[in-house]
């Protein structure tokens, strides 16, 4: 019996996407091999982090990289770096930020369930924008002598927010850094270096999603000075906000190999596999009554469907109660099936986490659940 069977844990077919709640992504053999190798020796973690960061920076094409234990940890560490910098007195005082620059400017529409990762540093948010629009002058006026950084979530960029390029220009004119959460923005591969190249000061990317690395890993990319400040506010340094956000030697090694693989292979072949899986699922689901079922791709306005270049199956049952009944039926089976709920009536099926043969299983189970819950 394997570990899940021994613990009595039910397996899940992941048609949701690379989400932390269902285990991130599945790692390749080279990534697992690197983790096993790292597990067999002791090492100075600070030196490993430094050398891994230098190696990854050269590979990716950015000034500096710090490996952290998740994108969520990256948000906290990046915020601490912008608030406390290199000052050991400030670093050890966090989250007490009295007398420091302790405000983070953020679009009101960008507030989300990762707020706590930033707020734990002891900052206050200064919001800009309304539900329908945000003007450049709002950001200009929101930046004061208490502003530590501007925070931007790529997944929430849309018609009611300023484009990232404008945010960077305005913030830099005021001498304020920009932190960009791009946790789920791989693919496209260009984002790995491109967001920093566009002027973002600190870019945070999950290691356990599109990169295919360990779930408990992430990257902070950016300029040498600010990434250096991140390192001082992070593990393994004592008495820092980031000390509890421990990244192990195994995760560091695994993420290095995952990035190497991703850069070498790209997403071209994977894209063909994803499209084939979507067509397989659509073949079972087309023409079902009482539902709109289609393939979707490149919907940047839908923040729940990031990264945008991945094709998905879109299922709209036009009734919130029925949608929830379908999700319950999918979850009850063995294995359970995890899908992504969108709004009140929609759920989507993602192809990239599926293993061989699972597209058909997912489609058959979804078809049966839709038939069972169809209006009389």
Image (tube, grey):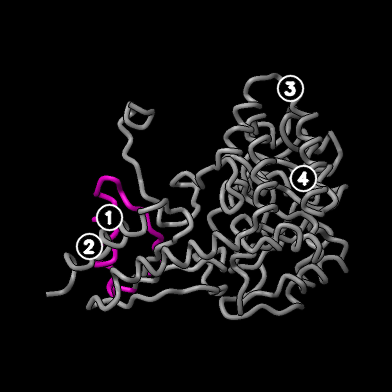
Q: Which residue is mark 4?
A: 56
**Residue in front for this viewpoint, 20 or 105:** 20
Q: Name the residue at 71% across, 57% down.
A: 192
Q: CA distance from mark 3 to mark 4?
A: 19 Å
Q: Which residue is mark 3?
A: 43
Q: CA distance from mark 3 to mark 1?
A: 45 Å
Q: Which residue is mark 1?
A: 330
Q: Earlier in the sequence, mark 2 or mark 4?
A: 4
Secondary structure beneath dot 4 equals helix
How would you rate the neighbour count of disc 3 (Cα within 10 Å): few for under 14, some for 14-19, many for 20 or more?
Answer: few
Q: Quadrant of the C terminus?
A: bottom left
Q: Which residue is mark 2?
A: 369
**Residue in front for this viewpoint, 254 or 323:** 254
Q: CA distance from mark 1 to mark 2?
A: 7 Å
Q: CA distance from mark 2 to mark 4?
A: 45 Å
**Residue in front for this viewpoint, 352 or 131:** 352
Q: Earlier in the sequence, mark 1 or mark 4?
A: 4
Evaluate if marks 1 and 4 touch, with contact meaning CB atoms under 8 Å apart: no
Q: Earlier in the sequence, mark 3 or mark 4?
A: 3
Left or right: residue 78 versus residue 155 is right
Q: Earlier in the sequence, mark 1 or mark 2?
A: 1
- Find residue 290 and report its image quarter: bottom left
């Amino acid at each position: 019996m394997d570990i899940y069977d021994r613990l009595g844990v039910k397996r899940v077919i992941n048609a949701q996407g690379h989400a932390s709640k269902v285990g991130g992504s599945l790692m390749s053999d080279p990534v697992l091999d690197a983790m096993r190798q790292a597990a067999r020796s002791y090492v100075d973690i600070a030196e490993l982090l430094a050398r891994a960061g230098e190696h990854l920076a050269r590979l990716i094409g950015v000034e500096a990289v710090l490996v952290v234990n998740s994108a969520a940890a990256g948000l906290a560490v990046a915020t601490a770096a912008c608030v406390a910098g290199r000052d050991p007195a400030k670093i050890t005082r966090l989250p007490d930020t009295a007398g420091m620059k302790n405000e983070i400017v953020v679009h009101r529409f960008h507030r989300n369930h990762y707020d706590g990762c930033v707020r734990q540093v002891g900052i206050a948010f200064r919001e800009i924008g309304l539900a329908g629009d945000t003007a450049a002058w709002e950001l200009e006026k929101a930046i004061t002598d208490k502003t530590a950084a501007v925070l931007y979530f790529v997944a929430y960029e849309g018609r009611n927010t300023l484009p990232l390029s404008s945010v960077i220009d305005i913030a830099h004119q005021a001498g304020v850094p920009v932190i960009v959460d791009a946790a789920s923005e791989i693919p496209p591969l260009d984002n790995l270096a491109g967001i920093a190249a566009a002027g973002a000061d600190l870019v945070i990317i999950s290691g356990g999603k599109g990169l295919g690395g360990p779930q408990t890993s992430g990257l902070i990319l950016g300029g040498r000075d600010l990434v250096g400040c991140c390192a001082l506010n992070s593990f393994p340094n004592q008495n820092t906000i980031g000390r509890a956000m421990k990244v192990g030697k195994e995760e560091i090694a695994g993420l290095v190999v995952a990035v190497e693989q991703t850069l070498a292979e790209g997403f071209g072949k994977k894209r063909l596999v994803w499209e084939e899986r979507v067509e397989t699922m659509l073949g079972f689901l087309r023409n079902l009554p009482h539902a709109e079922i289609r393939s979707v791709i490149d919907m940047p306005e839908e923040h729940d469907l990031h990264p945008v270049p991945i094709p998905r199956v879109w299922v709209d049952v036009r009734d919130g109660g029925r949608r929830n009944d379908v999700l319950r039926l999918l979850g009850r089976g063995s294995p359970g099936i995890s899908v992504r709920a969108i709004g009140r009536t929609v759920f989507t099926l993602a192809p990239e986490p599926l293993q061989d043969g699972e597209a058909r299983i997912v489609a058959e189970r979804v078809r049966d659940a839709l038939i069972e819950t169809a209006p009389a």
